Each structure stands twice: as C-alpha cells, then as structure tokens.
Image (cartoon, rainbow, N blue to C red):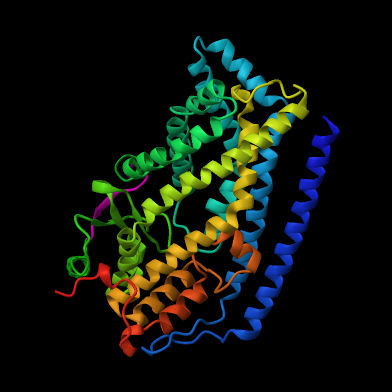
Amino acid sequence: MSKEIRRSIMAFLFIFLLFVFAVIISESINSSNILKTYPDPVSIAVPDVVTVSKPVPEAFDFQESKVTTWLIRIFLSIAVPAFFLFSRLSAGIRNWAGRRAGRWVVMVIIYFVLYSLVETIIYFPIDIYTGFFRLHKYGLSNQTLFQWLTELLKSFIVNTVTTAAVIWIPFLVIKKSPKRWWLYLALLIIPYMFIGSYVQPVLIDPIFNEYKQVEDTQLSGKIDQLLAKTHIDNCQVLQVDKSKETNQMNAFMTGVFNTRRIVLWDTTINHLNNDEVLGVVAHEMGHYLMGHIWKSIVIGGLSGIIVLYLVYRLSTWFLKKSNGKWGFGELSDVAALPLIMLMINLMLFVSAPLTNAYSRSLETEADRFELEVTKNNFATATATVKMHQQSLAMPEPGYIYMLWNYDHPTYKSRVDFANEYKPWENGKPLKYQKYIRYD
C-alpha cells in the first residue's frame, strides 16, 4: 500500500470520527431541548391550532438507535468495498468467474452476482436488526421472521437480476472511452431512470405487494371528487396491503405516463379519517402536477455528470497509486467495481445535504399544494401528527442528522406550516392556483 493511500485512509478515519462526534453532540443537544421546550402530550381535538407534544420515551430510544445504525451504514459503505479491494477478494472473484465463463459479458454477470451475494451476507446482521428485530422491539412490525427473510430474498433476486442485466454496459463504456466514460454514463442516467420509473409500478412493485382499488367506496368517491378539482387525467389511486407487515403509515406517487399512480398503504386508510386521507392524496397529487418525478430524473442526470466526473478522477488516482496491488490495472476491469462503488458512495455522502435539501423543497411544494386544494389545515396537521407519532418519529432531529438523512421537512416544521399557511383567509392568491379547477 502506497503512503498516499495510507494517508487517505487516515484522513477519512479522522474526518469520520469528527463527523460521528458532531452527530452525537448535535443529537444530545436536540433531545435536551425537546425535553425542556415541548409540552406534555395533549389532545389535538380543537380545530384551530395543532400542538406538537413531547415524544414518548420510546421515541428517544428509537432515534438513538436509528442514528447509531445510520452511522454504521455510512462506515460500511466505505469499508465493505475497501475490504473487496485490499483483500484482493474482488480480483479473486473475477478470476473465478473468468474460468467459468466463455464470454466477457457472462463473466461480468457472474462476478456481479457473487459480489452482491458476499455484500448481502456482510450487511445481513445490521439489515435483520434494523428491518426486523428493532421494529418488533418498538411495535412497528407485524412480520414473522420467515416473511421478512422471504422479502429479503425477493429483494436480493430482483435487485441482482435487474442490475446484472445491465452491469456490463458501464464497463463496456469505460473500456471504449477511458477518458470520457463518466460523461456518457451520466447521459445514460436520464433514460435509465425514466425506464425504471415507468416499469417499476407494473413489473417490480407487484412482486412484493398486492395493489387494488380503494375498498372504502365512500372514501373512493371523495378521492374522485378531489382529483376532479385538478387537471390530473387517468391517475389511479390504489391501496396496498401493508398492514400484514407494519403498523406504520405511508403513501407515495410512482410511475410516469400510463403507469402513474398514487398508492395508499391500507394502514394509512385504517388509522386516518377521510379528511386526513384526502390531504395525503392531495399531497401526492401535488408531486404529479408539479412534475416532481420528471424534475428529479433530469436533475439526477445532470448532477450525475459532476458526481461521475469526480468518481473518474478519484478512481484513476487511487488506481495509479495502488501500483497493481489490487489485482487489476484498468477501471474497465470488472474487478474495479468496488473501487468505483467506494468513490460513488463517498460522493453520495458528500452531496447528501444538497440532495436532501432539494427533496425537502419538493415536499414543501407538495404540502403547500395540499393545503391550497383542500383548505383543510386542521386535517393536514392532525394527519401529520398521527403518521409521525405512529412511527415514533422525533418532532425535530439533530441538525446534522437532518441535513444528511431527511429528504422530507421535519415533522414539527410541517405541522407549523399547516397551522399557519392560509392565504385565502386574507384574500391573497394561491401559489398553485393554475393547477386547481373552480368549475
């Protein structure tokens, strides 16, 4: 190992330890402030102003656990690909795959399947803790261990097969254009993300859950009336049976063109009243009407140019300094995958505050649209409280954790916004009036 690489490792460890220390201090200060300033739990029955109360003790414990495992995952995102490199395991897997494959593409696919399998095994302890044992500890999961393991296996198969089908393309591009591959791959991100957004609702999602029409006919009729207030055409609103897995609530907008749909977890329908569910639907409608999926795809492709360029420069530098000790000498060698992934993970970590800030701005737009189309501030605020309290979410996390981990505004800020945003009461124009029909 060259001294430059050793210095890089020491620098990363030093910066990471400082980051961990800053996160711990930030979370401690935040928890102390919440205990001192938030009121004890009160009823939210008065249709005026909804109060965010002090979380239950379990929420503080859950937050501490989430922060700890988040930090562990950040470290593993660097340490795991580094392990593949420094142990020469990556080169060993490539050699093994090469002896069993007659064609280069087949060798790359075999390599990736084995790489994914080893990586899944390494992550298994933290995955089963966060995805199963911890959720059961806090009463947030209904899954049996067999069901959880089945979902993990399905996720592994789907992710591995779909990625293995295209993983050879980046390496072919790197081989054909060793100095411009970062640009060509970045330009491919946009069509790749579009295709993924198009097929996921109809090909991928049904593998994991059953989607059907909203069973509550009264609620379904009200949803149709809400959709008719806007210029949305042919947008399905479906419910998915998540109560067999979780007690938490959620909803999301997915798909493009004729595969677009709004999906409500059945837990959301079961635990919220109709006005609150309509607010949730209106929020997802806002995402569609304002083209948030399209914007995210385009911005993802453009930002990919910067990210992949930096990955190219850093990967090239580390490869040069390795002097061939990792068992490969070119980035077009499939054994370089962990090096490329290490640099991508590093760039994603560095850029996370910007990515999350952009996502939070989109969510705020959707919150604003929800209020403007429903004009039911109380239902929006109470739904926000119920959904977050059910998940043991903190009203506000520590600032650093929020910057790096929150792609939605904090629960407290969303309730405050719902309480305060009422421009129609003062005769002011609505920001998103053009999306709303008045006939």
Q: Is 268 contained in the magenta span?
A: no
Image position of 92 (left or right of 253)? right
Task: Find residue 408 and report its horizontal and vertical position in percent.
Answer: 49, 64
Quadrant in which the N terminus appears:
top right
Dividing the picture into quadrants, the one containing residue 111 is top right
Residue range in magenta is 206-214
Task: Find residue 239 and report its horizontal and vertical position in percent.
Answer: 29, 57
Residue toward you, 239 or 168: 168
Q: Residue furthest right?
A: 3
Image position of 50 (left or right of 255)? right
Residue toward you, 156 or 355: 355
The answer, for residue 325, to whether it is visible in the render is: yes
Task: Find residue 52 and report its horizontal and vertical position in percent.
Answer: 50, 81
Quadrant in which the C terminus appears:
bottom left
- Looking at the image, is 143 positioned above or below residue 320? below
Dividing the picture into quadrants, the one containing residue 433 is bottom left
Residue toward you, 286 or 207: 286
Q: Is 209 contained in the magenta span?
A: yes
Residue drawn at 72 percent across, 32 percent down: 317
- Looking at the image, is 180 positioned above or below residue 104? below
Image position of 297 (left or right of 316)? left
Task: Find residue 144 and report its horizontal and vertical position in percent.
Answer: 46, 50
- Looking at the image, is 77 positioned above or below residue 421? above
Q: Residue furthest left?
A: 439
Image position of 139 (left or right of 190)? right
